[in-house]
Amino acid sequence: MVQTTNSTFIITRELLDNYPIPPELSPSEFVKTYWSYYTSNYKSNNSVNGTILENLIIIALAREGIKNIYYQTEVSFVPSAKFDVFLYNDEVPIALSIKTSLRERWKQADLEAAALKQVHKEAESYVLTISAGEVATRRKMDRTYAGIDGFILADTPEFDKLVERLKGMTFTKAGSVPVIKSENRYYTPEILSDNFHFKP
């Protein structure tokens, strides 16, 4: 049977129901512990694994009091990009790309991060993963990425450091951003006729 997005919600709920969260777990300990519960109790499925990791990271953020967490969202004027997690701040929006493994997926994340920065100059974009070997490889590369600000291992204290920083920021609902701000300033054939006696 093909598992759907709804099944990932069910799996995540089952994990939390079956294993109540110890309050003392740090964000990275939470991710590490519940990822282990998931892999021990459910058959691996590549299309499901990534969403489960996203869910765990979102819960880890929410546990720390971070609010208004957008997920699988598109940002106005950033074409062909969907962000796994997006935290909107007027000055420094934060985009998180969440991957169980990187392979070539980091390239798409880099393109999306670069596109985001064309619109929101101060935005920051991070790739969160649990693949230590692949992060080590990316960090060895002597290169500057087009948009990615860093690779973070979500099951280590470096994730805790990111979360601590995010806790010091205020994230709000982004609201609706129209393509044209002055939406009443446009011409219809009737207005053209009334204003200029011009009939197109």
Image (spheres, grey):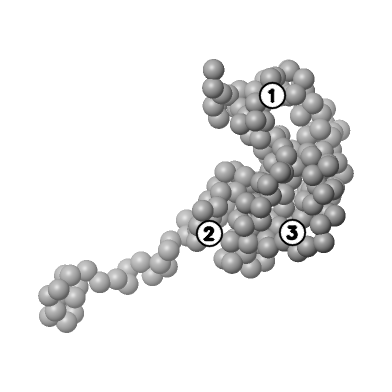
> Left or right of 50: which side holds 167?
right
**In the picture, which quadrant includes the C terminus?**
bottom left
Q: Earlier in the sequence, mark 1 or mark 3?
A: 1
Measure how far apart labels 2 and 1 are at the Cα level: 33 Å
Q: Which residue is mark 1?
A: 44
Measure how far apart labels 3 and 2 are at the Cα level: 18 Å
Residue 162 in view in this figure: no
- Residue 178 location, x and y as percent? 43, 61
Helix, strand or loop at mark 3: loop
Question: Decide: marks 3, 2 in contact (CB < 8 A)?
Answer: no
Q: Quadrant of residue 159?
A: top right
Helix, strand or loop at mark 2: loop
In the picture shown, does residue 34 fall above or below 125? above
Q: Which residue is mark 3?
A: 149
- Residue 96 location, x and y as percent? 68, 49
**In the picture, which quadrant includes the N terminus?**
top right
| Residue at 67% from the left image edge and 66% from the top image edge | 122
- Badge nearest the viewer, 2 or 1: 1
> Left or right of 115: which side holds 134?
right
Q: Quadrant of residue 103?
A: top right
Q: Which residue is mark 2?
A: 78
- Badge nearest the viewer, 1 or 3: 1
In the picture shown, does residue 158 fall above or below 112? above
Residue 152 in view in this figure: yes
Q: Earlier in the sequence, mark 3 or mark 2?
A: 2
Q: Earlier in the sequence, mark 2 or mark 1?
A: 1
| Residue at 76% from the left image edge and 64% from the top image edge | 144
